[in-house]
Image (cartoon, rainbow, N blue to C red):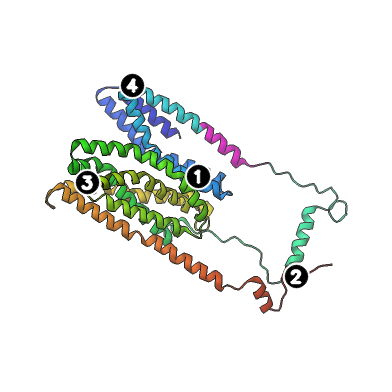
Amino acid sequence: MAHAIIFQVFLALGSVSTGDVADRITTMALFILGCAGPGVFNGGYLGGVQVTNDVPTLKAALTSFSAAAFDGSALVFMLFQAAATGLQLGLAIPSLVWAGVTAVCAATFTKFLHSELAGPKVVEPSHHLEGSNGVLGASPMKNDRSCTAIDTMLSPQAERPSRKPSASIGATLCMPFNVLLIFFVGSYTLASSFYVESQIDQFQIMFGEETATQISTFFNYAFPIGGFFTAFPASKLLDKVGGGDRDHVYWGLVWLCAVVFCFLSIFPNYQCQVTAAAMFGPIRCFQWASYFQFLANEKRYAPESIGRALGYNNVLVALLGDGMPYLLSYLVNEDSWGQTLFVRYTYVKFGLLLMVILAGIFPLYLTIDAVRAQKGSENEPSNDDEDSMHGRSSPEAIMVI
């Protein structure tokens, strides 16, 4: 949180400075923003997951609205621009005001997490009170242990629950579903990042300066607003199918929406481009909400490895999704191939479409995994059948006098 506040302060200082000093301070502010952005979001998200871990509905809402807030932060730059140009305030005052708001929110959230994660005080049971068996000095805890011992004697083959050792972070990252997750999210992030960086240029080539400005302005507002309103239905969907057994359902929907967006963005048609611009925010929010919901699933990731898996996965996704657009922009501007700039853009976007289609192997893998798990549960004998096979009665059928 401190990095985000420092970024706002540096941005304010850079706006009131002049010459090379202003450039250096602004460059430092952008560098701090790059370092702070993922850390601030990851820390806040993981803190929220720890608080809502026992309530699946709240966890689904957290993942959806966290993704909406992540994408909705793009609206802040629009507000800065409106304040700097429309109200003639410059960047210093909006930056300092936003730094104050960030500081208050950070302090409030930190205090909330500290109070929630501290937990209630545990009161030790008294060993000098009369137990349930009527003997003075007996502890109810001891009676519970006796009952447990009796249950164990009645079920000789019952084993004590033992916690499986969690896999190392390297083994966790190399799990097939995690590798496919990184490829899926990285592929669509690459397509969406390239679209954000080059959409105004593509619109100018297709429709001219005036129409390009209109579509680009519409996109700048539709992106954060559409993502925010998508959080409501996304949280409902993730609450129903995001528990770990039906991950293929929401990932299949994300893949289908991503393919439709990439397909529409290729055509030099006004309606197709406006539809793609309107779809961008909701699809991106849905994709990131699904990503965070999947990583918070303790059926796939050990609780102690969720934070590290999120951090390493984000780095890998950023290398593919945020680093590669610069290479694609370089290829588009190279006139040694393709007849025109429009043709080169079309080739690149078609390649991205094929990459997103190939990423559909991830929801396909989850579907096959879910089918295998369902067949395994159907073939597994029930406790009553297993007990009858071994000539035993179930513990519920035994009466102890």
Q: Where residue 87 is drawn, which disc sits there?
A: 4
**Residue 38 visible to the viewer:** no
| SS state under label 2 | helix
Cα distance, mark 4 to mark 1? 35 Å
Amino acid type at image mark 4: Leu
10 Å crowding of disc 2: few (<14), some (14-19), many (20+) = few
10 Å crowding of disc 3: few (<14), some (14-19), many (20+) = some
Residue beneath disc 2? 397
Seen from the viewer's position, the closer of residues 306 and 350 is 350
Mark 4 or mark 3, which is nearer to you? 4
Cα distance, mark 2 to mark 4? 78 Å
10 Å crowding of disc 1: few (<14), some (14-19), many (20+) = many
- Specify the segment rendered in magenta: 107-120
Q: Earlier in the sequence, mark 4 or mark 1?
A: 1
10 Å crowding of disc 4: few (<14), some (14-19), many (20+) = few
* Side of 212 relative to 275 (left or right): left
Q: Earlier in the sequence, mark 2 or mark 4?
A: 4
Residue under the point 45% across and 33% down? 2
